[in-house]
Image (cartoon, rainbow, N blue to C red):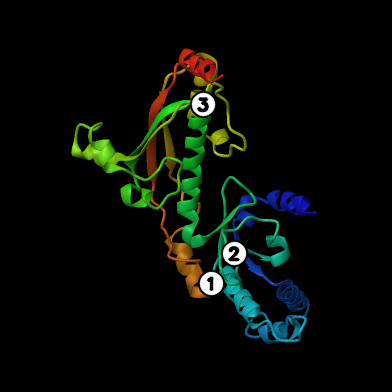
């Protein structure tokens, strides 16, 4: 049942399911019924839905009005009328999706991951989490292919302050460790993360790759490592599209009365470079034999 719900939701075009708000099913049902009647008989107040009538229908099991849910739905309606294509979904539908801990909450706008249909972030954290996910996938790819060293450098966009708020499997940004490796102060500042690893004697592609299929250079690197014993690597993690999640949308949803789920992290066109080395195949084989 849950899998079917996820599959049905994933089948929608991204534009239709990119922005969602979550409401109780009683509120959704009442609002949908009111919209149908308005369409058929042109009822409503000032050209809008009759929210008082919606509130009178939207009762919870105890008989109390679901005021918070109605207010959230009103905010969604105002945002939609301002041009934001927001899809209202019920708590039952939301249960088939992945939200941050403590979510979903009524009145908060959520944004869908551009490459994974069942993952949703608050609008406030959308750009940070989406970039972090892409960076982590690149690191996971390199580790699975047998990287023995990885260095992440900022080419443009978000840099050291932003990197300190990311959760990546490379430890914390370390400027002092970069000092000996960089010839200039500018180069030192561009190094964001570094890691040393033992490598693996069985290079492979990790499961559940998402961004990989949209990054030809990542695929070329993987082929070079798996088929031809590539020893050095340099790939980029770029984040250039704001996916329409920008200051304009922020103003629209704030004016409508929806919450962003925190302090909004605006988009910044960003390119980070990941460089390092893979262990020679012979070294990996010897390591495997010594561990046997």
**Residue 38 at x, y = what percent?**
73, 78
Question: What's the distance in space between the residues labelled 1 and 2, CA to CA?
Answer: 15 Å
**Residue 284 at x, y = what percent?**
49, 18
Question: What's the distance in space between the residues labelled 3 and 2, CA to CA?
Answer: 35 Å
> In the current view of this chain or complex, which residue is farthest to the right?
1
**Residue 145 at x, y = what percent?**
51, 26
Residue 55 or residue 222, whichever sits in front? 222
Q: Is residue 91 left or right of residue 105?
A: right
Q: Secondary structure at mark 2?
A: loop
> What residue is rendered at 59% in x and 62% in y?
85
* Vertical placement of residue 142 versus 248, above or below: above
Viewport quadrant of the C terminus = top right
Q: Which numbered dot is residue 145?
A: 3
Viewport quadrant of the N terminus = bottom right
Residue 231 or residue 271, whichever sits in front? 231
> What residue is rendered at 45% in x and 68% in y?
251
Name the N-terminal-most of marks 1 and 3.
3
- The answer to which quarter of the image holds residue 182 is top left
Badge 1: residue crowd in 10 Å (few <14, some 14–19, many ≥20): many
Q: Which residue is mark 2?
A: 103
> What residue is rendered at 54% in x and 69% in y?
82
């Amino acid at each position: 049942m849950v899998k079917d719900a996820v599959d049905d939701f994933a089948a929608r075009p991204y534009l239709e399911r990119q922005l969602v708000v979550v409401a109780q099913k009683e509120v959704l049902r009442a609002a949908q019924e009111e919209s149908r009647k308005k369409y058929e008989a042109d009822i409503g107040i000032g050209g809008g839905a009759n929210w008082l009538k919606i509130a009178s229908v939207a009762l919870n099991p105890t008989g109390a009005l679901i005021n918070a849910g109605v207010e959230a739905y009103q905010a969604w309606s105002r945002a939609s009328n301002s041009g934001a294509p927001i899809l209202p979904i019920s708590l039952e539908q939301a249960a088939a999706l992945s939200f941050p801990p403590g979510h979903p909450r009524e009145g908060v706008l959520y944004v869908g991951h551009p490459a994974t249909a069942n993952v949703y972030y608050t609008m406030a954290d959308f750009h940070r989490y989406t970039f972090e996910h892409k960076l982590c996938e690149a690191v996971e790819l390199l580790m699975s292919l047998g990287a023995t060293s990885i260095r992440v450098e900022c080419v443009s966009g978000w840099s050291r302050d932003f990197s300190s708020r990311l959760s990546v499997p490379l430890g914390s940004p370390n400027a002092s460790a970069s000092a000996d490796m960089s010839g200039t102060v500018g180069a030192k500042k561009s190094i964001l993360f570094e890691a040393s690893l033992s490598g693996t004697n069985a290079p492979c592609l990790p499961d559940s790759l998402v961004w990989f299929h949209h990054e030809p250079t990542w695929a070329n690197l993987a082929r070079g490592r798996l088929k031809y014993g590539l020893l050095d690597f340099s790939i980029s993690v770029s984040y250039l599209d704001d996916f329409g999640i920008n200051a304009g949308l922020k103003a629209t949803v704030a004016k409508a009365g929806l919450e962003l789920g925190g302090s909004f992290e605006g988009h910044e066109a960003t390119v980070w470079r990941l460089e390092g080395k893979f262990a020679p195949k012979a070294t990996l084989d010897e390591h495997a034999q010594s561990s046997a």
